[in-house]
Amino acid sequence: MASGLLPEPGRLLLAEPYLLNPDFWRTVILLCDHNEKGSFGLVLNRKLKLTLGDVIPDLSFFVAPLHYGGPVQPDTLHYLHRAEDNNAIKESILLYDQVRWGGDFDDLCQKLHRYEILPNDIRFFVGYSGWDENQLKNEISENSWIVADSTNEDIFAEKPSKLWHEVLRSMGGIYASIANFPEHPMLN
């Protein structure tokens, strides 16, 4: 099921339909960093029943849900935002097309207080998904992951729970068929 695309920052990883690990079952992960030492990504399609204010009370005025970023370091906060260069969070890393990862937390707080960043333009994550050197390469060669291009709509989707199906359908061909695989084939 290899898509022919190589993993790189700004691309998506879609879990193959029968990857049974509950941390990654039918996940869509945005790769934020990928190099010879390893890879770092954030799960886009697992919204939690927590808000930013639940973990940082000083920011409770800014109503934004938290997302599950992955099983590594679940006590850490990460964020993706979209902004023009002149309004980006200081020290954030441009992934592509105004989509940025991380940045200076104090600058983030100031921008949130001034509503320079709106809830539709930022996503907050607890934890992250990480791979050691060559681990992701091996998992892709074992067909555990499908690499896909991403869009702003993928990252800032209103209904992230549908993202796995939507991205596969948009890829067409065999991938559109994979989107229709049953969740529990043993029950069919």
Image (spheres, rainbow, N blue to C red):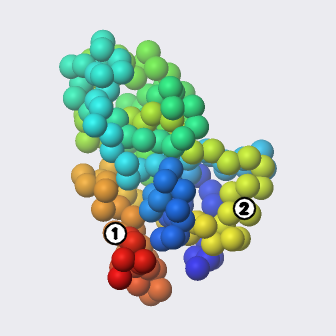
Type of the residue with mark 2:
Lys
Residue 154 lies in quadrant: bottom left
Type of the residue with mark 1:
Glu
| Local SS, label 1 | helix
Q: Is residue 110 above or below residue 14?
A: above
Looking at the image, is mark 2 or mark 1 earlier in the sequence?
2
The image shows residue 98 at horizontal and vertical percentages of 42, 46
Q: Label 2 vs label 1: CA separation?
A: 24 Å
Q: 168 and 104: which one is in front?
A: 168
The image shows residue 171 at horizontal and vertical percentages of 43, 77
The residue positioned 47% from the left and 42% from the top of the image is: 69
Which residue, as the protein is rendered here, is positioned at the far top? 58
- Characterize the local packing of mark 1: few (<14), some (14-19) or many (20 or more) Cα atoms within 10 angstroms: some
The image shows residue 188 at horizontal and vertical percentages of 35, 82
The image shows residue 18 at horizontal and vertical percentages of 51, 70
Q: 19 and 7: which one is in front?
A: 19
The residue positioned 44% from the left and 46% from the top of the image is: 99
Report the residue marked by disc 1. 166
Q: Is residue 77 above or below residue 48?
A: above
Taking the image as shown, residue 170 lies to the left or right of residue 18, namely left
Report the residue marked by disc 2. 137
| Local SS, label 2 | helix
Q: Is residue 106 above or below residue 129?
A: above
The residue positioned 63% from the left and 61% from the top of the image is: 7
